[in-house]
Image (cartoon, rainbow, N blue to C red):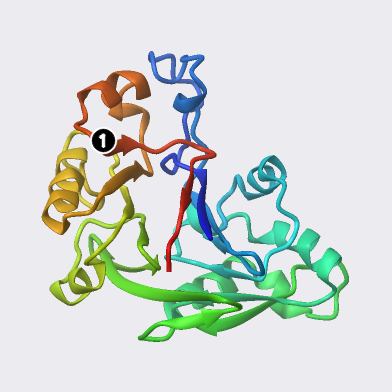
Amino acid sequence: MTLKILGSGTSQGVPVIGCKCAVCTSVDAKDQRLRSSAILQSAATTVLIDSGPDMRYQLLRAGIDDIDAVLITHQHQDHTAGLDDLRAINFIQKHSIPIYCSEAVEARIREQYSYIFQNSDYPGIPRINFKRIPSDSFLIGDIRVQPLFLWHADLPVVCFRVGDCAYITDANNIPNSELKKLQGLQNLVINALRKEKHHSHFSLEEALTLADDLGVTNCYFTHISHQMGMHATVQEELKQNRFLAWDGLELPINI
């Protein structure tokens, strides 16, 4: 089983439109970041984590045309704005796609995509089936998912652990009850927006401290802004087994 990073950038992506900074004009592929998203894949099951505005290109680039379910962490646009493109998957599969999310996220999606629900018989609209994320671990196909209930400033977010790997995006507060679920990780993927402190995301230093406190073997930082600096430069500053993630990074998951 694997976790693949489809996008490692923040809400504007990198490069940012109109920005001429060193990061946004870099020719290093690792400095070119689509909006944050990931894919869980086993031999039998494919689960998309978040469906941002770059989803169409992300799936094409990764060669993914079969999705068994979508996990939505929270309702911000950079994590939901690509849901309309699921209709291409509907066309292939000939059935609706389960969307696992919170009640608040469902309400936002129903508002944002009202045309889906106002005329459900209209051809060519996405076919989705809402499912509530349970309080404890649950199965999607042969993938057992452990939800993590975190905070993005004052907004609840749900992130996920599978086996010895956890994926945490758009968070800056992890309650003690959820820290207990993060013991014994081989790989942690966690948001680190920039070096400076931010009101709703972990900074690089905060994410590094958390990874050390948890004793994770490897830590990869995602949801990265151009303000972080160039990938190669920042990577040289990090200690062993701590990495800036990049689009296309694939990590093994042991169950």
Q: Nearer the viewer, residue 3 or 76?
A: 3
Q: Toward which corner of the image does residue 196 lie, by quadrant?
A: top left
Q: Residues within 10 Å of mark 1 (few under 14, many from 20)?
A: many
Does residue 15 appear anywhere in the picture? no
Would you say 89 lies left or right of 197 here?
right
**In this picture, is 22 found above or below 57?**
above
Q: Position of residue 190 (x, y in %)?
A: 31, 51
Does residue 40 appear anywhere in the picture? yes
Q: Toward which corner of the image does residue 46 lie, by quadrant?
A: bottom right
Q: Toward which corner of the image does residue 235 lie, by quadrant?
A: top left
Q: Position of residue 35 (x, y in %)?
A: 50, 43
Quadrant of the image for the C terminus?
Answer: bottom left
Would you say 218 lies left or right of 39 here?
left
Residue furthest front in the image: 254
Residue at 25% in and 66% down:
182
Label 1 SS: loop
Would you say 10 lies left or right of 184 here?
right
Residue at 59% in and 48% down:
53
**Residue underneath mark 1:** 194
**In this picture, is 28 found above or below 118?**
above
Residue furthest right in the image: 123
**In this picture, is 50 found above or below 207?**
below
Q: Position of residue 233 (x, y in %)?
A: 29, 18
Q: Position of residue 160 (x, y in %)?
A: 39, 67
Residue type at mark 1: give it. Arg
Count of numbered marks: 1
Residue at 36% in and 24% down:
231
